[in-house]
Image (cartoon, rainbow, N blue to C red):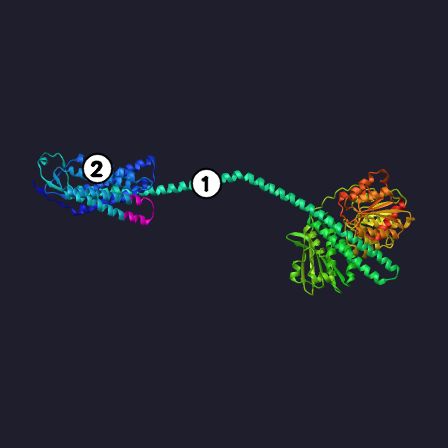
Amino acid sequence: MEHMHGSHDTLLVIFSYIVAVAASYTVLDLVGRISNLKGKSRLLWLLFGASAMGMGIWSMHFVAMLAFSLPVPVPYNIVIVIVSVIAAVIGSFFALHLVGRNDRLTLPRLLSAGILLATGIVAMHYIGMEAMQIGISYNYACVLLSVIIAILASIVALWLAFFFKSGAGAMKIYAKLGSGLVMGAAIAGMHYVGMYAAEFYVDESMKYSTGVVFNQQFLGYFISAGTLFSLTISLLGIYLVNKISFKDWEIEEKTKEIYKMNEELKELNSNLELLVKERTAQLEQAHDEAIKANMVKSKFLANMSHELRTPLNAIIGYSEMLAEEAEEIGEPLFVDDLNKIRNAGRHLLALINDILDISKIEAGKMEVHFEKVSIQQLIQDVIATIKPLVDQNNNALITSISDGEMTTDVTKLRQILINLISNGSKFTKDGTVTLTVAEEVRESQAGFSFRIQDTGIGMTPEQVEKLFQPFTQADASTTRKYGGTGLGLAISQSFSEMLGGEISVESKMDVGSTFTCWLPIAKEELPVSNKEEVQKYEQKSKVNILHIDDDPLNHKLMKHYLANEYWTLAYASSGQEGLEMAKQLQPEVICLDILMPSMDGWSVLNALKNDEELQHIPVIIWSMVKDEPLGYSLGASEYLTKPINKESLVSTFERYMTDQQQLKVLVVEDDATTSELMTKLLNKEGYAVTQAHNGQHAIDCVKGERPQLILLDLMMPEMDGFQFINELRATAEWCDIPVVVVTAKTLTGEEHLKLSSYVESIVQKGMFKHKTLLEKIGQILTKE
């Protein structure tokens, strides 16, 4: 047996190595793809991967065999060739199945997969060798070496495939390419060691061979090219599938994210109604608390009004009483000092009243009543009212007025102008105060600007910034030097805003200030509400009291208060009507309100005192406006806060005064100072006085000795004034005892109406002179 030696085609050898590298790289990509799949998709990819891997390894083997040439042509058994391909595919399938599982790669599993793949490769190689129909003998040492190389190459290849199945980026591609070069060299090395183990010789079987003799060079190139093309297509397919899978993964992640967001939205939506209910409950609670706080504030102001007015009443009353006694004994120095005390008390009382007014504005309880007014007539009324105050500092009042009409709240506009002019006059001495009224359009809206310019002390920009804040003046020194509460401008600004306008100011230090109030002209007439008709005249021959008030309710209250008197009453519902009735009726006393439309009380008072036929008639101001200095400067006899009718009581007391020695008065007052003051005043006039410190004590006193009159405070411990009145009127023998309420409490409209049915009069502490109280008492006791 003569052995033959063959030769290798170098180019085909190179191609066989390239095929091995391409097959190795394909394996590395396939493992990463297979590990992410499950079910049917995984099985299909396993079959595809096993076929590609097995065909790639077989192609490398067969091309390498074709690269080997013997001196004689060698036929091939096609069936055995096919069997060798199947062996390579089966080995690749099991190897990919074990390595492609998506969990941790253990050493036993790696060894098992490597041996299965090596078995397939070795089987494929040596079965393929048997397909050559020529005599072959083997060097078993080399065969064993080829098997070892196959096992090691398979283990390394599968480990690298598992290692690179996850991750991304260029570094992974380069690493897989390097691994493919190593694996290709190992597979090629296994084949060529196996070929080296074989020795070929010619035997008898070649003569009867039915195999096929190939054109080795052509077939080698053809299989190499076809395999490389197939593997390239496979890699391209894997790349595209990975891209699509990545997009699918992104879509799946987005879908999960959207689903999660939808679940969160559902949860939020399910809780939204509960949140809305909770928020609504919180808002309702806040609203209720705000209402409660407002009620507490109103109650606090009412209580503070009582607590402050009570001692002020004593201060003012005692100072007046002592001043009279000082005059009687000829001590003018004491009179001056006592008058200072009285004026200080009245100033403090005015401050309290301003605080209550600004609180009413802040609470939104200030009403607005629009009516048409002549600018010329309005300014004339204001000038007549304010002129005495301007003259006090020796100032000249200059006016420049454009005539016209506007629809506004006349009373509030008049108060704005009086406040601004009096403010300019207060800070100007021996100078001028100029009032200019002109039409002005602002933001396409017609209106009037009321400009008040003075030559006073002026202000700095910092002082102007805080000018309209309540309780604020230019600085502390201004307050000390010029006085005032700092509320006039704040109230004026609020009024102007309520009327749809604004107040602006320009000022220069030591030059003067200019205040401009702009108000719009209303284009539509506001309907006038129908007022309840009030009986104007009592059927008596002589009119004692003329009551001028635009509110029918006040007429009714006046009639009720004086229902048991033998006085003749007349009522006027406007200032102009009151002037006409005063000339016609010539009443003994005129009771005048201030806040009236068209012609207010200031204008009426000025007209009365400038009329020779009417100027002798005493005028009692009975109003909610608290401006005693202005009232007295215009000629008022008395200045009272509603519902007091003081001057009529003075006139009646002077005409019907009787002997008071036997008349008994019960003073019900918990404040010891006020009680002592009233007792001294009454004792001085000859009345017998009994003191009670609360309602229950007063009931006991009435049981012991019936008084002819009761002076009653309302806010007392144990039994207050309201409870006392109810107890008193519930007893038949006491129900006709006249009661005069003397209180510092700010009464509501409901409380006024309630008390009006049971008491003779209501007197506000601190708002009356002690003479007025004595006159009222004398009038009531004279009637009794």
Residue 215: mark: none
The count of marks equals: 2
Q: Is residue 509 left or right of residue 99?
A: right
Task: Indicate the secondary structure of the residue bearing disc 2.
Answer: helix
Nearest the eye: 714 or 669: 669
Q: Which residue is mark 2?
A: 85
Task: Indicate the secondary structure of the residue bearing disc 1.
Answer: helix
Given the image, on which type of amino acid does mark 1 rest?
Lys
Going from N to C along the chain, the mark reached first, 1 or 2, is 2
Q: Residue 328 location, x and y as percent?
A: 88, 59
Q: Could you tell me which quadrant the N terminus lies in?
A: top left
Nearest the eye: 750 or 393: 750
Residue occupying image coordinates x 22% and y 36%: 86
Please tell me in which quadrant of the rendered image residue 560 appears.
Answer: top right
Q: How many angstroms separate mark 1 from mark 2 (CA)? A: 51 Å
Task: Say whether residue 166 is magenta.
Answer: yes
Q: Is residue 458 above or below residue 282?
A: below
Q: Residue 58 location, x and y as percent?
A: 21, 40
Q: Label 2: few (<14), some or many (≥20) within 10 Å?
A: many
Q: Which residue is mark 1?
A: 260
Q: Could you tell me which quadrant the C terminus lies in?
A: top right
Given the image, on which type of amino acid does mark 2 rest?
Val
Task: Say whether residue 165 is magenta.
Answer: yes
Nearest the eye: 83 or 305: 305
Q: Residue 689 location, x and y as percent?
A: 86, 48
Q: Is residue 139 visible?
A: yes
> Which segment is the magenta one?
161-177
